[in-house]
Amino acid sequence: MLSALWRTARQASAAPVTRSTRLPTLTKSFTVTHGQDFPTGQERRVANPPEPVFLTLSSLEGKKEREKAVALDPTVFNHPIRHDILHLCAVHHLDSLRQGSANTKTRGEVRGSGRKIRPQKGTGRARLGDAQSPMLRGGGVAFGPKPRDFSTKLNRKVIEMGMRVALSVKLKEQRLGVVPRIKWYCHKTITLKNRLETLGWRTGTLFVSGLPLVDSAFQRAGRNLRGLEVRHVDELNVHDLVRWRRVILDLPAVALLESKLSKQLVIPTELEAVASTTSVS
């Protein structure tokens, strides 16, 4: 009976295995602009694109406009919440900020003579060496701090996941806003303060711009407001997203974040596939 079972198992393992090699269905296409290697206007298709996340577009200038919504990439702004990833990224950033310049002198670095304080025997007191002993006042430090590097290593993909998680947390807590642009019409602080109080963005608000230069009038009007800061999207990190109560992005910043952090599967065009095969060969 055992030999029959063994024979059946060997026959089953020797039989050819057929596996399905179906590609994901293509349900959406979009147009991107290539560089010099490929002609412009080629269509690249996304495999199984998820439903976008819609957020109402706010207006900083206060003009009466019809309510508009901006479509956000769900792979960036609707990521599963991972508190452990946020903790790793925050600790990694705080470690990089430490100076590590604390320094103490050992007994070999303290100035003074190396003469023995008193004889080893005959005085009835404890034995002592030189005056630089860590046991004595004014002596060296036994195990004191020395200059060191406190920075830690963290993989780039973990940091990118932390950015996705932090943005998703802000969106779920309704503490993420999107404006067409971060711009103000004058440099008066009182005008910007009144507008931010109307919107509820007065304190604890971080404005993130994707433009190379932030509007100078907005910077001058907001630099005297406590609890308000403006940064470029390249300077944004996970610790800032966690620390600030509210984050306001402009449309260029959203586009840059999605281009860096998006995880949608893109199917290359025929020209790209041919070029890749020829370069490998």
Image (spheres, rainbow, N blue to C red):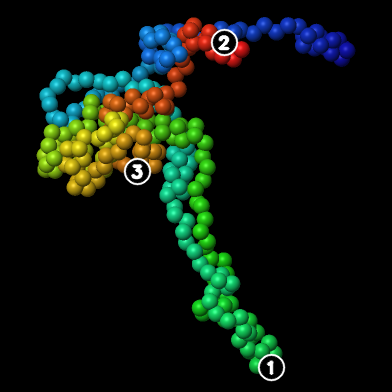
Q: Which tag is nearer the camera, tag 2 or tag 3? A: 2
Residue for badge 1: 122
Is residue 100 at least partly visible in the picture? Answer: yes
Residue in the picture at 84% in, 13% down: 6
Q: Determine whether 102 is above or below 66 in the image.
A: below
Which numbered tag is attached to residue 278? 2
Which numbered tag is attached to residue 166? none
Q: Which tag is nearer the camera, tag 3 or tag 1? A: 1
Question: What whole-number distance in Å separates the C-alpha atoms at marks 3 and 1?
Answer: 65 Å
Give the camera-side residue of 147 and 226. Answer: 147
Q: Amino acid at mark 3?
A: Arg
Whether residue 205 sits left or right of residue 78 in the image: it is left
Question: What whole-number distance in Å separates the C-alpha atoms at marks 1 and 2?
Answer: 91 Å
Is residue 25 at least partly visible in the picture? Answer: no
Residue in the picture at 13% in, 29% down: 62
Q: Position of residue 206 (x, y in %)?
A: 28, 39
Residue for badge 3: 243
Counting residues from the start of the chain, the first of labels 1 and 2 encountered is 1
Image quadrant assignment for residue 99 = bottom left
* Quadrant housing the N terminus: top right
Q: Amino acid at mark 1?
A: Gly
Q: Determine whether 135 is above or below 102 in the image.
A: below
